[in-house]
Structures are given as C-alpha cells and as structure tokens.
Image: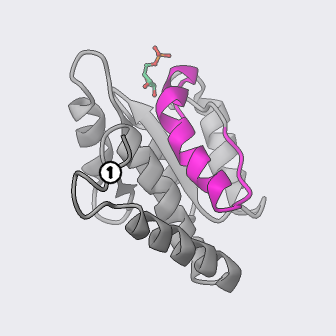
Amino acid sequence: MGSRSDWETMRHAVAMLERLGIPHEARVVSAHRTPQRLHDYAAAAAGRGLKVIVAGAGGAAHLPGMAAAMTPLPVLGVPVESRVLRGVDSLLSIVQMPAGVPVGTLAIGQAGAANAGLLAAAILALSDPALAARLDAFRAAQTEGVPETVADAAP
Ligand code: RP5
C-alpha cells in the first residue's frame, strides 16, 4: 500500500488472504515518497517467489502502475477512497494504463480490497487444487448465507 493510512482499506485484502490460508506480506511502499523502495520491491518480487501483487493507493495513485512496469507478476490495483475526490481520482489513476502494462483494477475502497484478495486467490488456485477447494467452499458458504427473504435474515 502507498501509505500506512491505506491500511484501513487494504486490511480487507489481507483478511481475505488469511481466511483462505494464503501466505502473504503487507508492506508500505510509496511511489512518490519512497521511489527507491518501490523499485527494489517490484524488481525483486518475482525472484523472491511472490506470485501476485495487490497494490492499493489513493489520490494520484501511481503505485500499481509503476509496480506493474517493474515486475512480470500480475498486479491487482485497489483504488483507495481519497478524502477530496472520494477515490475517483485513485480509480482513474490506476485503471487508465497504456496498452502493454496491465493492472487489474478493482472497485474503490473496501469492496475492491476484499475482491483483490479473492482474485489473487483465484489466480493462485489455478495451480493449487487445495486452494481451489477452499475457494469453492468460501463461495458455497457465501451463497448459503444469503437469505431468501428479509424474515430469514438474522437480526
Ligand atoms: C497515496 O497518498 C497513498 O496511497 C494514500 O492513499 C494517499 C495519502 O497518503 P497519506 O498522506 O495519508 O500518507 O500515496
């Protein structure tokens, strides 16, 4: 994430990874304030054995795109909701990548972070049958948890 202040959003990605038993790390790496840290992190990521990068940032959110420019790994971008423009700035900064350097862009905020965790899981599950089974179980439980009527819903 681009700042410690992004954690309130990005913790929802981490929660999903933990729920699905996926090893992960969470780092603060700012494209603007710590450019060398970003370079070092992205350039070394594949060699360290990482498989997917989830990059969340807000405002002029260059972190996902810059990370994608420096790694062959899939990069999932989470637009963090900014104070002034409610995350529309983040979304547009992340989604409008030039052809040739993709960032898989999720929704603004908490839903995007949670779905980034799930999408990372789906990518990893392609080569991990046990994880695929856990992901199937998650989806089945989610379906089971949706009430058919308002009366069925827990108070
Ligand atoms: C971005 O600037 C970060 O991703 C964060 O969303 C935003 C504001 O950062 P702080 O000023 O709260 O550290 O780089």
Looking at the image, is 16 positioned above or below residue 131? above
Which contiguous range is marked in magenta? 1-26
Q: Nearer the viewer, residue 101 or 127?
A: 127
Residue 76 visible to the viewer? no
* Residue at (39, 69) in percent of width and height: 143
Q: Position of residue 2 (x, y in %)?
A: 52, 30
Give the quadrant of residue 20: bottom right
Verify whether residue 7 appears in magenta. yes
Residue at figure coordinates x 24%, y 50% from the top left: 96
Does residue 56 appear in the picture of this structure? yes
The image quadrant where one finds the C terminus is top left
The residue tagged 1 is 153
- Residue 32 placement, left or right of 51: left
Q: Quadrant of ligand 1?
A: top left
At 74% from the left and 57% from the top, the residue drawn is: 23
Q: Tell me, what colour scheme is on the image?
A: one colour
Foreground residue, 16 or 94? 16
| Outermost residue toward the right in this view | 48
Q: State the SS at label 1.
A: loop
Place residue 27 in its image quadrant.
top right
Indicate left or right for 150 with 56 as reference: left
x then y, percent, for residue 24 = 71, 52
**Magenta span: chief secondary structure:** helix
Residue at 71% across / 46% down in the picture?
Answer: 25
